[in-house]
Amino acid sequence: MVKRIAVYAGTFDPITNGHIDLLKRALKMFDSVIIAITTNPKKTPLFSLEERVALAKASVKGIKRVKVESFSGLLVNYLKKKKAHTILRGLRALSEFEYEFQQALMNRKMFPEADTVFIMTSPKYFYVSSSMVKEIALLGGSLCECVPAPVDKALKAKFSKKGK
C-alpha cells in the first residue's frame, strides 16, 4: 500500500499555533506529514534555519506521524526525493489564494504527479501570522494563544537580547 505523504513547506519563522492546527487537521487525511522548512531569498528571517527546525520539532513533539526537516532548492525536487505527491498549504484570506494558486500550477507544471491541497485556517487562528507574531513579540505583547510554548520562550529571548 502506498503511503499518503503530504509536505507542508514554508519558512515557518516562527511556527505558530495556526500551523500546528492545520497540521493536526491534515493528519486526518494523510498517513504522514513532513514539515519542510526552507529559506526564502525574498525574506529575512528572525530565526536561523537551524533554530526554526529546532522550534518546529519542539512544537510538534508528541504528535505522531510528523517529521520536521529542512531543504533547499525547488519544492518539487524535495517531493520527488521523499516520494511524496501532495503539497499542503494553508489559506487565511482570499488575497493569499492568487499567489498560492499560481504556485500550485507552477509546481504541477514541473512535477505533473504533484497535487496541492489547500486547507482553510480555523477561525480561531485566522488573524495569526508569523509576521504579526514577531511584531507583537518585539513590542512585548503576550503570545500564549498564538504560538507553542517553545516559540514563545524563543521570541522572548530573542527580543530581550535586541533590547539590550
Image (cartoon, helix red, strand yellow):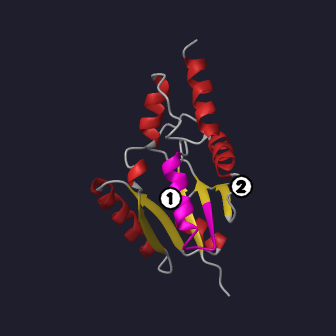
Q: Depth check: 102 or 68 in front?
A: 68
Residue at the image point whose x is 48% and y is 45% from the top = 41
Residue 101 % position (x, y): 34, 65
- Which residue is tagged 2? 62
| Label 2: few (<14), some (14–19) or many (≥20) C-alpha neighbours in 10 Å | few
Residue 140 % position (x, y): 49, 22
The residue lying furthest to the top in this view is 164
Q: Depth check: 153 or 43 in front?
A: 153
Above or below, comparing residue 67 to residue 32 in the picture? above
Between the C-alphas of marks 1 and 2, the distance is: 16 Å
In which quadrant will I find the N terminus?
bottom right
- Which residue is tagged 1? 22
- Quarter of the image for residue 34 reads bottom right
Residue 144 % position (x, y): 53, 36
The residue lying furthest to the bottom in this view is 1
Q: Which mark is residue 88?
A: none
Q: Amino acid at mark 1?
A: Leu
Magenta stretch encompasses residue 151: no
Q: Is residue 96 left or right of residue 5?
A: left
Which residues are drawn in magenta?
A: 16-34
Above or below, comparing residue 140 to residue 41 in the picture? above
| Label 1: few (<14), some (14–19) or many (≥20) C-alpha neighbours in 10 Å | many
Residue at the image point whose x is 62% and y is 32% from the top = 154
Residue 147 % position (x, y): 54, 41
What kind of element bears circle 2?
loop
Mark 1 and mark 2 residues within 8 Å of each other at the beta carbon: no
Q: Is residue 108 left or right of residue 73?
A: left
Q: Total marks drawn?
A: 2
What kind of element bears circle 1?
helix
Q: Depth check: 127 or 112 in front?
A: 127
Res. 34 in view: yes
Magenta stretch encompasses residue 27: yes
